[in-house]
Image: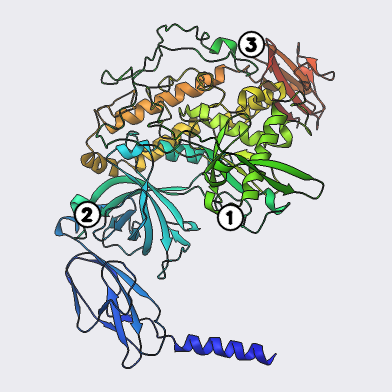
Amino acid sequence: MAWVVAMLLSIAARAADVPSAPEFSLPGGVFTNDVVLKLSAKEPGAVVHFTLDGSEPTAASARYSAPISLTNSTMVRARVVAQGKPPGALAVQSFVLLDPDVTDFTSDLPVVVVSSFGREIEKDDRIMASLRTMVPANGRTSLQTAADFDGRALINLRGRASLRYPKRSYTLKTVDARDDMAKFQVLGLPKESDWVLYAPYPDKTLLRDVLAYDLSNQIGRWAPRTRFVELFLNESGGRVSRRDYMGVYVFEEKVARGKNRVNIAGLGPDENAEPALTGGYIFKKDHGDGDVGPMQIGGPAFQSSTMSKTGFPTGPGGFPGDPAGFQPAFSGRSTSSSSSSSRSSRSTRDMVVTNRLGFLTARQSLPASRSVVRSDDDEEIVEVFEDEKYFDYFRSTRTNKFYYVDPEPDELTAVQRAWLKDYVNRCETALYGQNFRDPEKGYAAFIDVDAFIDYHLLIEVTKNVDGFRFSTFYHKDRGGKIRMGPLWDWNLSFGNCNGKQGFMAEGWLWPQLDDKEYSWFRRLFEDPDFGQRYVDRWSEWRATTFSSSNILGRIDRIAAELSEAQARNFERWPILGVTVSPNWFVGDTYADEVKWMRDWTSNRLDWIERQFPPVPRAEFRDAGKVGLSASKGKVFYTLDGSDPRAPGGKVSATAVEYTAPVAVKPGQKLRARTSLDGRWSGPLVRRVP
């Protein structure tokens, strides 16, 4: 054990030999006047080296000899260099200087100040910036309010087609003094390192993403938590001024693995055998890379197309909605379409949005190699194409294209890539096989059915035109099944799109999509029990989260929260009354925009409700009897708690058709459904008192 003691003593000696971090005469923060800063070292004779451009100080950096005068916003990094000793610990402070035109600025929202100290923020390269967040004190936030968080972050532009809007979104990764990734609590959100500053622009209510994420969280499906903020972004290196005001932003969690986010197991590069190899993975369907073109005030100039196409590739199939709710199948000739949804005369009816700009690089034809995936039971040979060993995506047997998210492509081993691709392929084989309804051999062995249904409902309730196609995430935990989610990028929803009939409160979105865009669902709905589970989940959420009172009430509360800040936002970005692609409705005021969205949402919920048979109503009467009724269809019930609908869709052998009030006993469990034209409603379940 002597050698262990000696080693520990040696490590302690080296640690003691490292100079202490230099001391600053002033802590960083926000200042209205010039700053005179002094640096000092604890060790006698030690030299302090510093930088003012955010770079790491070395022995070649400026040597401190006199007080430093700061007249503009500056990040000061310093360390002690003592002869014969290793470089000392880093110290960093950010000094944000204010121009007189913003010293009186206040808001009822949190305020975020980002300074890149003279460097332009770009998409592909992350640069260092200071990040300061402040929350209201006594109901107001100023730029001089005490910081909720004051640190540094790597920042870059985010988005694709949205980069062509002048109001940009940003990705942030918080770091410590050594530039290492570090998790922090920001604006009361759970501690993490990856964040997004999302810029609502064509969504003039500013709230569609926030509302959708909130609904997902309400039904127990994690989506990013959010905080509305007002942002000041200083790239000039000068004092923060009114010209740096960027308007209302959403500070939100980024989709990532973590106990407070997508809560799945971590997967390291050394975990290449089952069971560790089975998860966790996050992957997605999305756009490929491509040139998005120049920035435009009105947003991306999406390819024009007629809005008169009313059909879809296939008919209703096994989807459990009312067939009358589907438009006629597209015959190849355009016919005019209309909607009860109103719109502004300034809208551009003939523009269709796909968010799919530019061209994908053609997939090269390269020779295939083989990787071996081992499990406890057998050895399976999985083919991995050479191009996919290095690309950020894989293709399934059904030619679906999925991008790796977490672990990132360069963190995945060849065996992990092969395993995930093989699992998806086996899922597709089971789904499109003859025994696809078998609970052990079919699709249910590979996917979390309720997670898929909930995601589908969230898309259709909000009619997110990019849903199913882009920014569509999947995740798989270790030993678990594939789940859809979390939600991301929901600005083209709640009627805010002039393409894919997104402006119409009526009509399903999914029939307009081909099988690659609408991956797996057409086949899933060929299972009548999957379709019934869809109806049941709608019925369950319609009574709670998807109730009109809940969603409309949430819209009202968010709009009230933004009532003051939205005016400053649209002073900075004067687009009210202006068509910004892909707007359908264009209101003259913020209140107009919110009202139109609110009305659209109410109409949408009512329309969806009409597509399914009505859930029976129960009326408890005297003499221990229960009356059942439905506005249309026949009502079937049981008193033993069993389902009146048998698997596959027939009437259960234990079910009774309702014809007269039913005598019930205390403690019995009444379960009833409405049957209409071969379709079933959601269940009515009552425990008799």
Single out the residue that lies furthest toward the right: 653
Image marks 1 and 3: residues in contact by CB distance under 8 Å: no
Q: Amino acid at mark 3?
A: Lys
**Which mark's residue is nearer the viewer, 1 or 3?**
1
Q: Quarter of the image holding residue 380?
A: top right
> Within 10 Å of the Cα at label 3, are there few (<14), some (14-19), or many (20+) other Cα atoms?
few
The correct choice, above or below, for 261 with respect to 688 in the image is below
**Residue 465 visible in rendering:** yes
Q: Quarter of the image holding residue 238?
A: bottom left
Q: Secondary structure at mark 3?
A: loop
> Within 10 Å of the Cα at label 1, are there few (<14), some (14-19), or many (20+) other Cα atoms?
few
Instruction: Write down the residue under mark 2.
Output: 105
Residue at horizontal 36%, vertical 36%?
Answer: 161
Q: Of the numbered discs in the image, which one, if any, rests on residue 632? A: 3
Single out the residue that lies furthest toward the front: 367
Q: Amino acid at mark 2?
A: Phe
Question: Which quadrant of the figure contains the N terminus?
Answer: bottom right
Q: Secondary structure at mark 1?
A: loop
Q: Nearer the viewer, residue 600 or 407?
A: 407
Q: Of the two numbered discs 1 and 2 on the same chain, state the one appearing first in sequence.
A: 2
Instruction: Write down the residue under mark 1.
Output: 259
Residue at horizontal 38%, vertical 31%?
Answer: 357
What whole-number distance in Å separates the C-alpha atoms at marks 1 and 3? Answer: 47 Å
**Residue 108 visible in rendering:** no
Q: Where does the image place residue 448, in percent across and percent down from the top left?
A: 67, 37
